[in-house]
Image (spheres, helix red, strand yellow):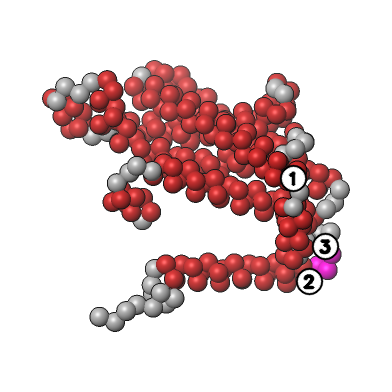
Amino acid sequence: MKPSNPFSFKSGTGARWVRRVLVAVFWVGLWQIVCLITGHEYYLASPWSVLQSLWRLGGQAAFWNSCVQTTGRILLGLFLGAVLGCLLGAITARLAWVEALLQPLLALIKATPVASFILLFLIWFRAPMVPVITTLLMVLPVVWENVKTGLSEIDETFLEMARAFRLHGWKKWRCLTIPAVRPYFRAACQSAVGLGFKAGVAAEVLSNLRGSMGGGIYESKIYLETADLFAWTAAVVLLSLLLEQAVTRLLLWGEKPRNRRKTHE
């Protein structure tokens, strides 16, 4: 059998990495071309300037402290939003009247611009709490709907089997409910991490919260430091992607290898 070339576009891993590199080169090259056309770093910083700014920021303790502070607030908001979303999802899946009562609230949260919530929260709460509550509010509807859907779509046959085997309480949750809801909860968390991170950083920007990544973005804009603005934004994107990967791996931990392959597929 002829061995496959790992760098061939017909192979799996090699093809994906080659495509990613080519796509990155294309967009960075286009970025550089636009910078040359504009001719002003004030309007659009070049990739090299952004990389220099990111390197300079990375050498400062204040930068890493801002990353830790922002990540901590957003993780707290993600956790609280996930817990509250699971509780509301479980209640509304079981009680139709509660779902009818809370459905307008869910629709209101989804329809209202996040900036409006942030400005209201600045009136109601202290600035450090605004990113936490904003993240919670963005995560809540996603987890709520997915958990409710997962509970509602449990096959009636499995429920009858659980009754036949006298599975009640925690045993029923461990053997039937949690495995059925887990894929929905995992998908919700994967979507919520990026959404929550963006909303949390936006709350920091509008709050002008010092010692945070959003605060760094705001100060870069005030002092017209475009390269620093791009560098802070790149750091936010990288941290968001890392957090999303970490959450995904955490949710996959303990599952059977076959289930993991299905998830990645």
Badge 2 element = helix
**138 left or right of 147?**
right
Label 3: state its secondary structure: loop
Magenta run includes residue 40: yes
Q: Which residues are magenta?
A: 37-41
* In-front residue for pair 75/233: 75
Which kind of residue does numbered mark 3 sit on? Glu
- Identify which amino acid the numbered label 2 is placed on: Leu
Rendering coords of residue 35 (x, y %): 77, 67
Tell me the distance, in whole angstroms, between the alpha carbons under discs 2 and 1. 33 Å
In percent of width and height, residue 190 lies at 47, 44
| Mark 2, other Cα within 10 Å: few <14 / some 14–19 / many ≥20 | some
Residue on which the image places disc 3: 41
Kindly identify which residue carries mark 1: 61
Tag shown at residue 36: 2
Q: Residue at x 39, y 78 (%)?
A: 5
Tell me the distance, in whole angstroms, between the alpha carbons under discs 1 and 3: 26 Å
Residue 38 x, y percent position in the rendering: 81, 67
Please indicate, yes or no, whether residue 110 appears anywhere in the rendered image: no
